[in-house]
Amino acid sequence: MPNTNTENKKFNFVLVQYTRDNVDQAEQINSYALDEFECDGIEEFALEEARVDEILGERAYSGGDVPESLIDEVQAATLDQDSVTYKYFFYQNNFEENAKDFVTFLKQNFSELPLYEAQKDFEDWNAEWKKFYTPIIVSNKLEIIPEWLKETRESSPATKVYIYPGMGFGTGTHETTYLCLALFDKISEQIEEKSPCLDFGCGSGILGIAALKTKKMPTLFCDIDKSALDNCVQNIVLNFEGENLEGTQLVIRERFKADKQYKVVFANILEHVLLLEKETILNSVAKGGYLIVSGLLNHQVDNIVQNYPLKKVEVLSKNDWSAILFQAV
């Protein structure tokens, strides 16, 4: 999580439940949350916490580790859900006031959406990650492993990206992050080692770190959120402590200039941001290079394909979400 003094620190979160029929509203609300109410992170869950408690029953409160079989039970139940829940996190500056204003905005403008608000200790957040986060097997060549489970996958021959998830900054569990990694894994053998990479909207840095680990690609990590960059630094250190990462940089979005081109560009951001940042992103892709975009609902794919004048190589989808692999030919 971000490098914040967490002693006696609390955070507010707001749960908003969407159905499969109105989940399109999430993009608009996410934009309002970030731009107007200083939301510090957003994470999607396909299963409500109340339903998790229902499945686990009293065992969820035992204070011990949750058995793997029960985690599997929770994950399987998410596939049958007709609803999607987003968590909006507030923990910096005037976080209590920002969360309250966000709830008021939702009640006034989206009164049909069920919501729930609460305040918890930071320690509660850490406990939730460790309880329900499991390794993500992208392929037999690439895995995403939470920091506290490093020892469980030591025997695997795959390249491992270790991560300490921050609030809503990309963990590999969300479909869009997974889809970006899966597309990158497909083209990795076509990419020369030490080719430059741009992770635009990097969040936790999981995509750029995968490029660094698998192909030694010097990577520029860029994000609009300083807290995301703090989490990115934490994960870079976790994976490369003591190593020389010459050419790898981090930059806040307002200081980023598209004055260099990259062999691989990741842009796992929302549709409206992909359209807003189109010129910058396109100018960053080298001739013959690849652009992997996501943050897209399935029905938004055609609009992005029409607006990005690159060769569409492949579209990969999982549940409601899609990612697109482009090539600049």
Image (spheres, helix red, strand yellow):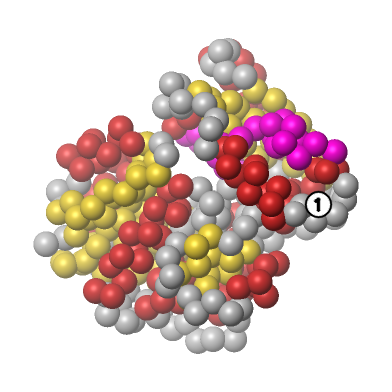
Vertical relation: 275 (above or below) 151 = above
Q: Residue at x 44, y 32 (%)?
A: 27
* Residue carrying label 1: 123
In magenta segment, residue 11: no
Q: Residue at x 57, y 37 (%)?
A: 78
The amino acid type found where label 1 is placed reads Glu
Quarter of the image for residue 146 reads bottom right
Residue 54's spot in the image, x, y percent? 74, 32
Q: Nearer the viewer, residue 265 or 294?
A: 294
Residue 309's spot in the image, x, y percent? 14, 48
User: In the drawing, does residue 213 fall left or right of residue 7?
Assistant: left
User: In the drawing, does residue 148 fall left or right of residue 280?
Assistant: right
Residue 105's spot in the image, x, y percent? 59, 20
Q: Residue at x 37, y 36 (%)?
A: 297
User: In the drawing, does residue 238 fall left or right of residue 312?
Assistant: right
Q: Residue at x 55, y 55 (%)?
A: 171
Magenta segment boundaries in residue numbering = 30-58
Q: Quadrant of the C terminus?
A: bottom left
Vertical relation: 170 (above or below) 218 = above
Residue 280 visible in the current orientation: no
SS label for mark 1: helix
